[in-house]
């Protein structure tokens, strides 16, 4: 069975859109645009995230990001990074939509510069307002099961709990919570932030999340293009493993061949 | 005309918002513009008249996660 056949029976739908990949890829911090584009291509990601910033009017050359991405139709997920409260996030979201690029928005509100952890109360407020304005809202949030449910009720199209703080590569700090979030969810759950390697990705997918959003672990890997491929395969492997139902863990051995009946004596 | 563009005061020869975009050579790029906190739709860039002291924000997409 090919990957696309597997996906045909196991689609990921967000905001009414059927996505071709469970890999959401960030576009920051790559060594150069060529490596970035190769990583995007190899990842087979459909959803790409961006940030919105003031144009540097002295040096307005750094907006090439969207110009090279014509090789495939992508779904663009701008974020509200830089916002420290709901009002700022709402303003950035409206700007993002005014570009005409997308009405998807990743709500990202950090009130602490050291941890960049999301502010849950402001995130909930912004999600409510933006969902009511017709945005497809994907809030980045803490790994709290009740909060994730509240975000869903506020109109989030998918909920994106962090595995660990952004860019740390610490992996999934609270797999128990992520498991509960998945069990309770009525919308897709995307692990966003904190992952480091393919092992973390497989763990996330085996916990039953619907997808993974990464940036730093790909962009800052020694070989970002290969890492993009590793992450893609990890997502597929983890998803298949989750769907296939792993064996229970046991304390003692069970032989792979029947042991007693036909034993050579 | 004296304007505040992206937080800095600037002297720009401009009658409409579109002139500001041209001044900074941003025409044809994916830019979102605000005047005094209100987003101005691209279709109105050539109609919106500017007055002294307006605060203009010009933003774009950059790489991010």
Image (cartoon, coloured by chain):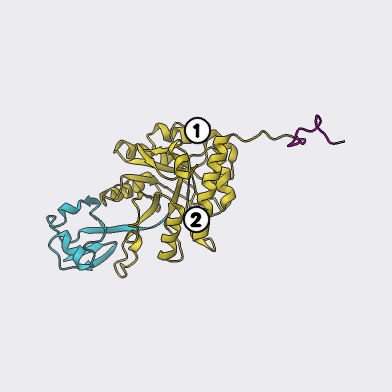
Chain colours: A yellow, B cyan
Q: Position of residue A19 (x, y in %)?
A: 39, 42
- Badge 2 and badge 1 in a common chain: yes
When asked about the image quadrant of residue A52, the answer is bottom left
Q: Is residue B57 magenta?
A: no
Q: Secondary structure at mark 1?
A: helix
| Viewer-side residue, A28 vs A168 | A28
Q: CA distance from mark 2 to mark 1?
A: 32 Å
Give the residue at x 29% y 38%.
A134
Give residue A104's position: percent from left, percent from top. 34, 44
The chain letter for the residue carrying disc 2 is A
Image position of A2 with respect to A219: above or below: above
Q: Are marks 2 and 1 in contact (CB under 8 Å)?
A: no
Q: Position of residue A151 (x, y in %)?
A: 42, 35
Q: Secondary structure at mark 2?
A: helix
Q: Quadrant of the N terminus of chain B?
A: bottom left
Q: Depth check: A19 or A63 in front?
A: A19
Image point (80%, 32%), residue name: A262
Identify which residue is drawn at 36% across, 36% down.
A128
Q: Nearer the observer, disc 2 or disc 1?
A: 2
The single residue placed furthest to the right in the displayed view is A265
Could you classify mark 1 by the number of other residues whose Cα lies within 10 Å: few (under 14), some (14-19), or many (20 or more)? few
User: Which chain letter matches label 1?
Assistant: A
Extent of the magenta region: A251-264
Checking the image for residue B40, the label placed there is none
Residue A185, visible in the rendered structure: yes
Which mark sits nearer the N-terminus, 2 or 1? Answer: 1
Q: Which residue is mark 2?
A: A228
Could you say which disc has been placed on residue A146 in the image? 1
Q: Main secondary structure of the magenta part?
A: loop
């Amino acid at each position: 069975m090919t990957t696309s056949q597997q996906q045909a029976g196991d689609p990921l739908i967000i905001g009414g859109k059927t996505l071709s990949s469970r890999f959401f890829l960030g576009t920051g911090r790559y060594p150069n645009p060529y490596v970035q584009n190769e990583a995007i291509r190899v990842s087979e990601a459909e959803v790409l995230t961006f940030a919105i910033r003031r144009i540097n009017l002295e040096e307005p050359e750094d907006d090439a990001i969207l110009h090279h991405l014509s090789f495939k139709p992508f779904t663009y997920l701008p974020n509200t990074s830089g916002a420290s409260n709901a009002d700022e996030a709402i303003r950035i979201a409206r700007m993002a939509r005014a570009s005409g690029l997308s009405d998807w928005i990743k709500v990202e509100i950090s009130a602490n510069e050291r941890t960049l952890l999301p502010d849950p109360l402001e995130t909930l407020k912004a999600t409510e307002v933006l969902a009511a304005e017709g945005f497809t809202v994907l809030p980045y949030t803490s790994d709290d099961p009740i909060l994730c449910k509240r975000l869903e009720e506020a109109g989030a199209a998918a909920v994106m709990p962090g595995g660990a703080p952004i860019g740390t590569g610490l992996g999934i700090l609270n797999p128990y919570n992520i498991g509960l979030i998945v069990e309770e969810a009525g919308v897709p759950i995307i692990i966003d932030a904190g992952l480091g390697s393919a092992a973390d990705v497989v763990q996330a997918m085996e916990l039953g999340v619907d997808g993974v959003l990464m940036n730093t672990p790909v962009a800052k890997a020694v070989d970002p293009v290969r890492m993009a491929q590793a992450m893609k395969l990890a997502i597929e492997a983890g998803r298949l493993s989750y769907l296939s139902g792993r064996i229970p863990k046991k304390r003692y051995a069970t032989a792979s061949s029947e042991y007693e009946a036909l034993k050579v004596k | 005309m004296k304007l505040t563009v992206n937080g800095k005061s600037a002297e720009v020869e401009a009658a409409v918002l579109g002139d500001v975009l041209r001044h900074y050579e941003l025409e044809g790029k994916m830019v979102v513009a605000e005047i005094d906190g209100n987003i101005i739709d691209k279709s109105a860039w050539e109609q919106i008249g500017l007055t002294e002291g307006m605060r203009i924000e010009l933003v774009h997409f950059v790489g991010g996660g």
